[in-house]
C-alpha cells in the first residue's frame, strides 16, 4: 500500500513536471506568428483547459504562509488564495492527518481580480469539530476544476479516491490549537 507521504511526493513531482512542460510550451508559442485574420494588437482569447489552471493558497486566517512554519489555527479558519481562471470552480478540502478522509469545505466567494493573470478567492473551512481535532495537524488543499464534480459541500473523499487529475495547490499543514 502506498503511504500518504509517497502520494504527496508523487503529486509534487507531477506538479514540477507539469510546470516544466507548460513553461516549455509557453516559450515555444511566444515565437509564433499570428494566424491569418487574427488581429496583431490583441492577445487571442483561448479556452482555458484544466491543465492550464493554477490555484494557490496564500493565507490561512491572517497568516501569510511560509514553508518553514506550521500555522496554529482555531476550529474555524479563513482560507484565501488565487486561481488563474475566474470561471473555474475552486474547492477547498481539509484532511486530519490521523484519518484517511478529505472533507469538502464551504465554496469560496466569487473570485475578485488581483491582476491580469490571477483572481483572489476566500472561504471558511473547519478543522475538526467542537470535540474532535484539538492539538491535531490538518492538511488543506485547494482544487481548481471546470466540471465541479469534487466541489460538493459536505462531500467526503477517501485518500484512494483523491482526484489526482485536477489542478491543485500545494498541500498546507496547520495545527489546531484552540476552539
Image (cartoon, rainbow, N blue to C red):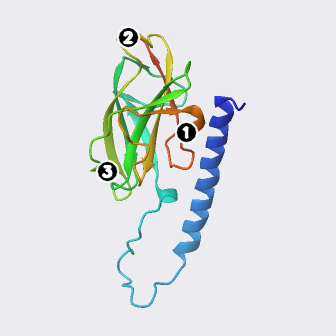
Residue 55: x %, y % from top left: 44, 47
Kindly identify which residue carries mark 3. Answer: 114
Give the residue at the far bottom of this rendering. 36
67, above or below 14, in the image: above
**Residue named by callout 2:** 178
Determine the secondary structure under disc 2. loop
Mark 3 residue crowding within 10 angstroms, few (<14) / some (14–19) / many (20+): few
Which element type, helix, strand or loop, lies under badge 1? loop
Q: Nearer the viewer, mark 3 or mark 2?
A: 2
Pick the front one: 38 or 143: 143
Q: Earlier in the sequence, mark 2 or mark 1?
A: 1
**What residue sits right under mark 1 in the picture?**
162
The Cα–Cα distance between marks 3 and 1, rounded to whole angstroms, is: 29 Å
Q: On the rendered image, what quadrant is the C terminus found in?
A: top left
Choose between 127 and 12: the one closer to the eye.
127
Residue 29 drawn above or below residue 17: below
Quarter holding the N terminus is top right
| Inter-mark Cα distance, 3 to 2 | 32 Å
N-terminal-most mark, 3 or 2: 3
Q: Position of residue 21 (x, y in %)?
A: 62, 60
Quarter occupied by residue 91: top left
Q: Position of residue 9 (x, y in %)?
A: 66, 37
- Pick whichever of labels 3 and 1 is earlier in the sequence: 3
Amino acid at each position: 500500500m502506498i503511504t500518504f507521504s509517497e502520494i504527496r511526493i508523487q503529486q509534487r513531482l507531477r506538479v514540477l513536471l507539469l510546470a516544466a512542460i507548460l513553461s516549455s510550451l509557453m516559450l515555444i508559442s511566444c515565437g509564433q506568428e499570428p494566424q491569418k485574420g487574427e488581429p496583431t494588437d490583441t492577445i487571442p482569447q483561448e479556452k482555458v483547459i484544466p491543465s492550464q489552471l493554477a490555484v494557490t493558497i496564500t493565507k490561512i486566517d491572517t497568516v501569510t504562509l511560509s514553508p518553514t512554519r506550521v500555522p496554529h489555527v482555531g476550529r474555524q479558519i479563513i482560507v484565501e488564495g488565487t486561481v488563474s481562471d475566474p470561471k473555474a470552480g475552486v474547492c477547498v478540502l481539509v484532511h486530519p492527518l490521523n484519518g484517511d478522509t478529505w472533507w469538502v469545505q464551504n465554496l469560496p466567494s466569487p473570485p475578485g481580480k488581483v491582476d491580469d493573470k490571477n483572481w483572489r478567492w476566500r472561504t471558511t473551512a473547519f478543522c475538526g469539530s467542537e470535540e474532535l481535532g484539538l492539538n491535531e495537524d490538518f492538511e488543506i488543499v485547494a482544487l481548481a476544476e471546470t466540471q465541479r464534480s469534487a466541489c460538493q459541500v459536505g462531500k467526503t473523499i477517501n485518500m484512494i479516491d483523491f482526484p489526482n487529475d485536477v489542478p491543485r495547490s500545494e498541500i498546507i499543514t496547520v495545527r489546531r490549537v484552540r476552539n
